[in-house]
Image: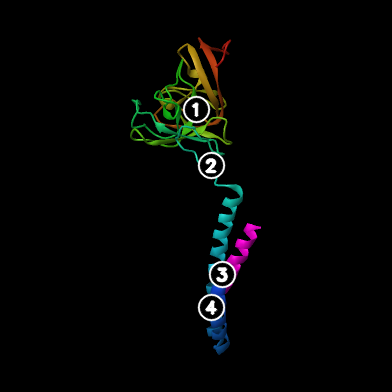
C-alpha cells in the first residue's frame, strides 16, 4: 500500500510540473503555420514532455527495487569475509606479503598468513597452500584490495598464467604453481602433494613468461605426484 501511495504522489507531482509545459508547447504547435516549423515544435514537445518522465520513472523503479528486494550484497574485506552472489571474495593484501608489487593479473590467490581477511599470491607447488581462486587485480602496496573469483563458485572459464618454460597441453589437469601460476600435471618433476585447480582449455609452448591460458576451474582437490604417477591422498583435506 505504501508503494502505491508513493507512486500516486509521484504521478501527481509529475503532472503538476509537466502539465503547464504541455499546454505551453501545444499552443506553440497550434500557432505554427509552416509544416517544417510545426515538425520542429512537435519534436521539441515530445523531448520536453517525455524525457523527464522517463528519467523520473527509471529512478523510481530503481528505488522501488531496493525497497522490495534490499540492496544487493557487496563483497567487502571485513570480519565476516562476505561473499556476494557472483562468487567473488574481497580480501586485503597481506601486510606480511613478500610478493609486492604483484607481477601481473590472473594469478591464483591463497589465504594470507596474517588472518583470513588477508590474501597473498599462492605459493603453489608441492605442499602448497589451498588455492582460493583467480584475481584480475594487480595490487601494488599493502592494504590494496584483492577481488578473488573463487574456484567452483562462479560459472564460466578462467584465465591462468602458465609457468615460464613449461608447456601446457589442452585438456590436461592444471595444478597451482609458484607465483600464483598454473602448471600442467604432465610437466611435474618434483614429488609431492599438489592442488588441482581445473583442466586446461588451451595450450602453451615452453617459451616466455606471464602467458595466459584458459581453463575450466573446479573445486580444488589434492593429488600426489610420485615419479609422474598421480594418485589421490588417503586422507584429503
Instruction: Give the answer, above or below, for where 71 lies relative to 143.
Output: below
Residue reaching furthest to the right = 1
Q: CA distance from mark 3 to mark 2?
A: 33 Å
The residue carrying mark 1 is 132
**What type of secondary structure mainly makes up the magenta span?**
helix
Q: Mark yes or no: residue 148 visible.
A: yes
Mark in front: 3 vs 4: 3
Under tag 3, what secondary structure? helix
Please tell me whether residue 237 belongs to the stretch shown in magenta.
no
Q: What range is drawn magenta here?
A: 1-15
Disc 1 vs disc 2: which is toward the camera?
2
Residue at the disc numbered 4 = 21
The residue tagged with tag 4: helix, strand or loop? helix
- Residue nearest the observer in this picture, 67 or 219: 67
Which residue is at 50% across, 17% downward?
A: 194
Q: Closer to the camera: disc 3 or disc 1?
A: 3
Pointer 3 residue: 13
Q: Is residue 228 visible?
A: no
Question: Which quadrant of the figure contains the C terminus?
Answer: top right
Residue drawn at 54 percent across, 81 percent down: 25
Mark 1, mark 4: which one is toward the viewer? 4
- Residue at mark 2: 73
Q: CA distance from mark 3 to mark 4?
A: 13 Å
Mark 4 or mark 2, which is nearer the start of the sequence?
4
Q: In the image, is 141 to the left or to the right of 25?
A: left
Task: Give the camera-side residue of 189 and 231.
Answer: 231
* Sooner in the amino-acid sequence: mark 1 or mark 2: 2
Q: Earlier in the sequence, mark 3 or mark 1?
A: 3
Name the N-terminal-most of marks 3 and 2: 3
Report if residue 13 lies within the magenta region. Answer: yes
Badge 4 crowding class, 10 Å Cα cut-off, few under 14, some 14 to 19, many 20 or more, is: some
Disc 1 to disc 4, C-alpha distance? 59 Å
Amino acid at each position: 500500500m505504501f508503494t502505491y501511495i508513493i507512486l500516486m504522489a509521484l504521478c501527481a507531482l509529475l503532472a503538476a510540473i509537466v502539465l503547464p509545459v504541455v499546454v505551453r508547447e501545444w499552443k506553440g504547435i497550434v500557432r505554427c503555420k509552416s509544416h517544417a516549423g510545426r515538425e520542429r515544435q512537435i519534436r521539441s514537445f515530445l523531448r520536453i514532455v517525455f524525457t523527464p518522465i522517463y528519467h523520473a520513472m527509471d529512478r523510481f523503479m530503481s528505488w522501488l527495487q531496493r525497497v522490495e528486494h534490499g540492496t544487493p550484497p557487496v563483497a567487502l574485506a571485513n570480519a565476516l569475509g562476505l561473499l556476494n552472489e557472483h562468487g567473488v571474495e574481497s580480501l586485503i593484501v597481506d601486510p606480511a606479503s613478500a610478493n609486492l608489487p604483484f607481477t601481473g593479473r590472473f594469478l591464483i590467490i591463497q589465504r594470507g598468513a596474517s588472518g583470513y581477511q588477508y590474501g597473498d599470491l599462492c605459493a603453489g607447488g608441492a605442499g602448497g597452500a589451498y588455492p582460493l581462486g583467480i584475481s584480475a587485480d594487480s595490487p601494488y602496496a599493502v592494504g590494496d584490495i584483492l577481488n578473488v573469483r573463487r574456484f567452483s563458485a562462479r560459472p564460466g572459464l578462467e584465465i591462468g598464467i602458465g609457468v615460464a618454460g613449461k608447456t601446457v597441453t589442452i585438456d590436461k589437469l592444471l595444478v597451482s604453481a609458484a607465483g600464483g601460476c598454473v602448471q600442467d600435471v604432465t610437466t611435474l618433476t618434483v614429488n609431492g602433494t599438489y592442488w588441482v585447480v581445473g583442466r586446461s582449455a588451451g595450450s602453451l609452448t615452453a617459451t616466455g613468461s606471464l602467458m595466459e591460458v584458459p581453463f575450466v576451474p573446479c573445486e580444488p582437490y589434492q593429488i600426489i605426484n610420485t615419479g609422474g604417477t598421480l594418485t589421490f591422498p588417503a586422507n584429503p583435506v
